[in-house]
Image (tube, rainbow, N blue to C red):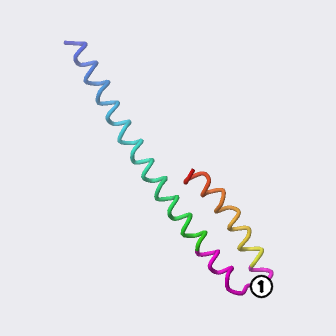
């Protein structure tokens, strides 16, 4: 009887941890998509004209977004 309770507890713990892992994976995919959208938006702005000051700002932001993309997408 005690062994059955232990096995049930272990199985429940595994099921709960699996659900958290799937949720974290979905959250990471969502962050990946949002990051890539932000990169595309900035790249689109850069294809238009921009000032030197804006270029510095865009390159700084892209550098950060590329790091985030590596973290979330790869």
The structure residue drawn at horizontal position 68% and vertical position 67%, both measured from the top left corner, is 62
| Depth order, front residue of 43/59 | 43
Residue corresponding to mark 1: 51
The structure residue drawn at horizontal position 35% and vertical position 41%, both measured from the top left corner, is 19
Q: Quadrant of the N terminus?
A: top left
The verdict on residue 51 being magenta is yes
What type of secondary structure mainly makes up the magenta span? helix
Please, is residue 30 above or below residue 50 in the view? above
Q: Is residue 4 left or right of residue 10?
A: left
Q: In the image, which residues are magenta?
A: 41-54
Which quadrant of the structure image shows residue 59? Answer: bottom right
CA neighbours of label 1 inside 10 A, class few (<14), some (14 to 19), many (20+)? few
Name the element at disc 1: loop
| Depth order, front residue of 3/73 | 73
| Depth order, front residue of 9/71 | 71
Q: Is residue 64 left or right of residue 11?
A: right
Residue 12: image location, x then y, percent: 29, 30
Q: Is residue 16 left or right of residue 40?
A: left
Of all residues shown, which one is farthest toward the bottom?
49
The structure residue drawn at horizontal position 60% and vertical position 57%, both measured from the top left corner, is 69
């Amino acid at each position: 009887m005690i062994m059955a309770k232990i096995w049930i507890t272990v199985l429940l713990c595994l099921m709960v941890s699996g659900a958290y892992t799937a949720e974290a994976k979905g959250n990471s995919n969502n962050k990946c998509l949002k990051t890539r959208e932000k990169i595309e938006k900035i790249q689109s702005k850069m294809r238009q004209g921009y000032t030197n000051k804006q270029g510095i700002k865009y390159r700084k932001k892209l550098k950060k977004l590329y790091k985030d993309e590596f973290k979330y997408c790869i």
